[in-house]
Image (tube, rainbow, N blue to C red):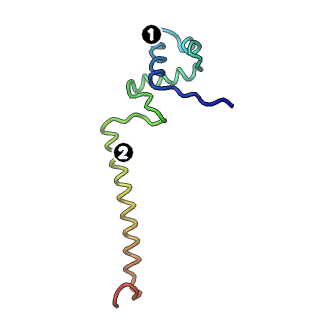
Amino acid sequence: MSERRKFDKAFKLMTVELCLSGKSTSEVAVELGLRPQLVSRWKREYEQRKEGSFSGHGKPALSAEQAEIAKLKKQLREAEIERDILKKAVSIFSKNDGKFFNS
């Protein structure tokens, strides 16, 4: 089984620029030894996101606002988990079984 090839952002941008310069997707694919479907996908991604495309690892590039929202959502999830843990601890320690309080 062959190993999956990886291409950096510069190579993908150069490939897309060749397509946009007038060459067909199949011509560019043959010249570079790529599948035409792959070149088409890169071209489509570039047309949708322009400079934000090819961010790597399948994660889309986020705007500053989107990154801030993601950060705040993560902090909220962590705070909710901490709150739930504290609620459980309070319920355990507040049971009136005489172990923890004089009653």
Residue drawn at x 52%, y 24% as measured from the top left: 41
- The amino acid sitting under disc 2 is Ala
The C terminus - image quarter: bottom left
Mark 1 Cα shell of 10 Å, populated few (<14), some (14-19), many (≥20)? few
Q: Disc 2 designates what residue?
A: 70
Residue drawn at x 33%, y 35% as measured from the top left: 63
Front-most of 8 and 35? 8
Instruction: Please identify the quarter of the rendering in which residue 91 is found.
Output: bottom left
Residue drawn at x 58%, y 27% as measured from the top left: 5
Please state the horizontal and vertical placement of residue 45, each as a whole percent of the image: 46, 26
Please state the horizontal and vertical placement of residue 42, each as a whole percent of the image: 49, 23
Q: Residue furthest right?
A: 1
Please state the horizontal and vertical placement of residue 54, each as a whole percent of the image: 45, 28
N-terminal of the two: label 1 or label 2?
1
Q: Disc 1 designates what residue?
A: 21
- The amino acid sitting under disc 1 is Ser
